[in-house]
Amino acid sequence: MAFKMAINYGKAVSRQSVPQTEALPGQVPNSAGGHAYPVDDWKRLERFLILGTDGPTYYATERELTLKNAAAVERCIAADGARTVQAIVDVSHKGRAPKNDPALFALALCARKGNEATKRAAYQALPQVARIGTHLFHWASYMDALGGLSGNGAKRAVSRWYGEKAPGALALQLVKYQQRDGWSHRDILRLSHPRSPSPQHGLLFDWATHGWPGIGETPHDDPALRIVWAFEKAKTAKGKELLQLVREYELPHECVPNEAKSDPKLWDAMLPSMGVTAILRNLGKMSAVGLLGQLSDAEKLVCDVLGDAEKLRRGRVHPIAVLVACRVYAQGHGDKGKLAWQPNRRILDALDGAFYSAFQAIEPTGKRHMLAIDISGSMDSGQIAGMSGVTPRVGAAAMALVTAATEPRYAMVAYERFLSVLDISPKMRMEQVVAKMQAMHMGATDCAQPMLYAAREKIPVDVFVHYSDSETWAGSTHPQVALEAYRQKMGIPAKMVTVAMVANEFTIADPNDGGSLDVAGFDASAPAVIADFVRG
């Protein structure tokens, strides 16, 4: 007679026996067939503002992801419009996000979908979020898509944007940022009819809408308006005349005809007044024309600028912009076109340093960190904030190195279905790290692997920092359960931080666990936030 083995009721109801394809209490299905915790709308808003939805992820199209995030933003607006506007201003004004577009879009949503108080707050915040002409054009295009720039509130906001700028600052905006997204200053000024707070403003509005026929051979009498005269003269100037205009009136490169930009003398004239972002974007071109030669004055100037943390902060230079510049410059050619150059090693060193400096200053905690990078297939799809070549996997490694450069006690691992010790360090060049991450094997996702590994090898860890999209599904143990088991086995109240590398709605961090934290990936303030949490 055959006997059936009795069921182990304790094991059957144990959290440790629940595979990731089944839900723990409070979890929801993720996009991969596993289960994770949902993030609330405020966390979703933060992720959207910082990471954006430029390009698809492994599991969602760009449109699908944008619509879901827009719906979350609208729910935040309905719940607390003033808080939503403040969150937008905080992320944008502090330079926490790689791109300003999500903040501009969310601000347009506040202006269109909010109640009267929210709309007033959104319009009042416009100059803080739309700081340059290009931002204003983006915001206008979003407003147009949501119903247009009609309405007294929108017109007054635009009028303030132009009218509150000093004449010289406004003149620079008008010549530097001509048009974008099908909008120009002429279009917006004609639509809003702003009042002129000064005669100079009136002349600038008139030039932007109608032009100044017969510009003449002598500069304008008003010093604040001379850059407009120089801009008009530069359209036809050649050789020494163009060089003199650039040097004397500090014309930005956007005001110089493209056909003249093969002259290294012209770039040498533009470089001293060039902003940090413009330098990052034009390193390849300046090297290609021969300006950034070894031991040259231009090389020294560029390295000095990139090494100045205060200039990076004032210029709101985001770490991911430096990472992209480093990746492109190191490869010696652009991602598009035929431009090629020989990378300058001193400038590559300066870019490496600038990447770390662009994050908020971090005081080391002295705690034991396990930096765990999700290298599964879904982490190799899409680009963070639409930045060329920066997949979530590459971005995760770069963010982990920021903590590794600060904390003296860390171990770095990579995981998919299995785990491996990762041989990258802050001593490596960023282009080497990017290449190594791009070459790694991809597999299914099991976010419990770091805790299981540390428990098995009896590694003392104070905090597990996951860089992941939380699309975990392949394990027989949930990450939260693995964390709880690790704490019990090792007698260490280990914490867990989930650094979200995609703007989706999932996290492996249990919101009811005081020792777990969820932050948005590539938030310039994230490493400092993590350190404060670990310290607390």
Image (cartoon, grey):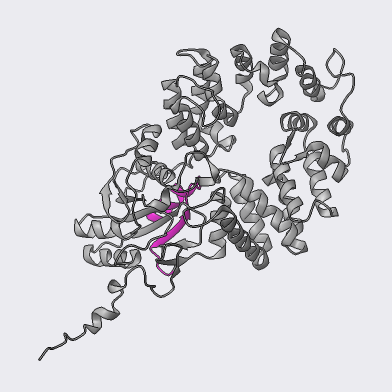
**Quadrant of residue 234 in the image?**
top right
The single residue placed furthest to the bottom in the displayed view is 1
- Residue in the picture at 84% in, 22% down: 222
- In depth, the one of 337 and 66 nearer the eye is 337
- In magenta stretch: residue 98: no
- Magenta segment range? 512-536
Q: Is residue 406 above or below residue 152?
A: above
Any magenta on residue 521?
A: yes
Q: Residue at x 49, y 12 (%)?
A: 296
Name the spot of residue 2 as percent of width and height, x first.
Answer: 12, 88
- State the count of labels: 0
- 99 vs 49: above or below: above
Q: Position of residue 466 (x, y in %)?
A: 37, 54
Q: Residue at x 53, y 18 (%)?
A: 288
Residue 72 drawn at (x, y percent): 60, 63
* Residue nearer the viewer, 403 or 190: 190
